[in-house]
Image (cartoon, helix red, strand yellow):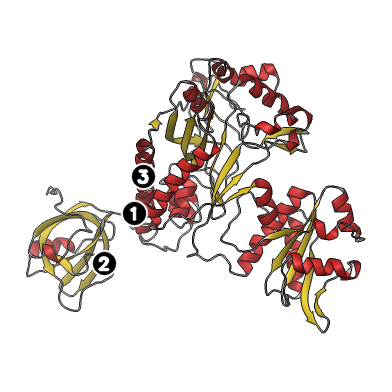
Amino acid sequence: MFFKTRTHTCGELREVNIGDSVILNGWVDTRRDLGGLIFIDIRDRYGITQIVFEPGFNAEAHLAAGSLRNEFVVSIEGKVRKRPEGTENPALPTGNVDVMVSRLVILNEAKTPPFQIKDDVDTSEDVRLKYRYLDLRRPSMQKNILMRHKMYQIVRQYFDKNNFIEVETPVLMKSTPEGARDYLVPSRLHKGKFYALPQSPQQYKQLLMVSGLDRYFQIVKCFRDEDLRADRQPEFTQIDVEMSFIDQQNIFDIVEGLMKILFKEIWNKDLPVIPKLTFDEAMEKYGSDKPDLRVDLQMVTLNHVFENTSFKVFNDSIKNNGIISGLLAPGCGEYTRNQLDVLTDYVKKLGAGGLIWMRVKESASGTELEAPIAKFLSDDEKKNIIESLNAKPGDLLFILTGSKLKTLSIMGQLRLEMARRLDLIKLNAEPKLLWVTDFPLFEWDEQTKRFYAMHHPFTSPRLEDVEFMESDPSKVKARAYDLVLNGTEIAGGSIRIHNADLQSKMFKALGITDEEAEHKFGFLMNAFKFGAPPHGGIAFGFDRMAMIFAGESSIREVIAFPKTASAISLMDEAPSLVDEDQLKELHIKIR
């Protein structure tokens, strides 16, 4: 028997269809035998409809239904009826009707799946990824993929409406390893030479600006051979954007316009005003350049409190240009010594020398501090600590001190740990967006004793800082910016260097010789000599955005066919060995 094309989807029938003859195609979701009646829920990506096999209505179809099992693929023909009173299912949009089946075609039988095709299934992620084609049948996964599709359409429509041109850039490009590790592709035609898969279309989009295509965007696959985690994959999707003749505010305006539409269309929320923090402010207040503003705990720099301290630990820190950072844990003053020891071990594992804690107590003489170091502090210092942190009796105070960025980063992680303990991050909390600006242009690596570009070597310094590029690169701030949503960086970009002289200074500061620069980036440098406009851009981590909009905690939940944390595809067993003949063609020998 041949199946007929469906007249309706499995999520479409309503009471207005009662009496209609319909054809449905889909998968068997559940089966219930009630004596002579067989009830089947048939499922497709649009929903579920109950179908009924009754021997008195059609004996042949009823007989055939006896062999149906979960995940069989079927086509049915029948008549829509109102469900008998008391059997309605208000949980389903189709729950007031069912279909009396007059014709059944089994299109394909199915083995018993390794897990049930339902949400909240109790199975490991590895099993789900091995049978991803089954996992994608689950309603929650289909909802995520459909939401991602909707986001694609919103992005394309928005940029098209704002005069951006979508341009595809090459997937096989020159290797310019400056940042993450490249994925290399050997060339069969050019012995011993390799292409690289792009970590981003950075150089191509800058060349498009030189070409006069002043507004470019692309939804593009990028590749980085780096260690993975919940929000990283070896191949990931970016919304890539570049504009000419603009400043930083123009980028912010375009990005905020897109976020406004996404908030409304995906979450049905109005976009709040997006605050801006400099990198230095974000680090001092939150201990992170991607702070989660849903957590209403702020760190406070206490250097001013201890300017004239006799406590050696604080005195040494200030003399060595370090920082003294404090954090208030409200209502935690009754923490036991054991709880405090656990938190001390926590920060020590992150690299701190120790953790200073203070309980805030009420006494006859007023508010006082109970702490192992209290005897080393003056009354004024104790008073100023309480005032600076706005502490009250019953609160607990933490202090860390040491080199600035390391200490702030550790305190930032302690801040989030306390937020978890105090249950301050609510699932239904309003989403919080934030711009972080004025990043350092360079970061120093102690191991290699050299500066690296914090973002990439085409990021423009602030013009007022150019004079320090040779004398003191650590002072130079970048015209760079990140967009942070709920503690996750979802987009990052910068105003670019657009003239060859400034780009040469940048390479020099990074320790890249003229010969290296010519070898790696010569084509871009040559292009700048033919009249490059001022330009800048931004790239969104599309997978991370989709993860947050879907309310998931891993980007694997919003990617159709993701890799594991060890960059393996369990479903098709990639990466895999290849034939010796293929290796010979590529002039490669495996040792």
Picture residue at 39% right of the left edge, 31% below the top: 166
* Image quadrant in which the C terminus is located: top right
> Which comes sooner in the sequence, label 3 or label 1?
1
Q: Which residue is mark 2?
A: 92
- Nearer to us: label 3 or label 1: 3
Q: Is residue 50 visible?
A: yes
- Whole-percent x, y for residue 467 in the image: 73, 29
Q: Which mark is residue 137?
A: 1
From mark 2 to mark 1, how far is it between C-alphas?
A: 17 Å
The secondary structure type at the circle numbered 2 is: loop
The answer for how far apart the CA atoms under marks 3 and 2 are is 28 Å
Quick check: can you spot residue 104?
no
Where residue 261 appears, as percent x and y from the top left, is 39, 49
Q: Crowdedness of circle 3 by 10 Å Cα count: few (<14), some, many (20+)?
A: some
Read off the residue under disc 3. 154
In-image side of 9 versus 190 (left or right) = left
Of residues 261 and 200, the one drawn nearer to the viewer in this rendering: 261
Rendered location of residue 101, percent (x, y): 12, 62
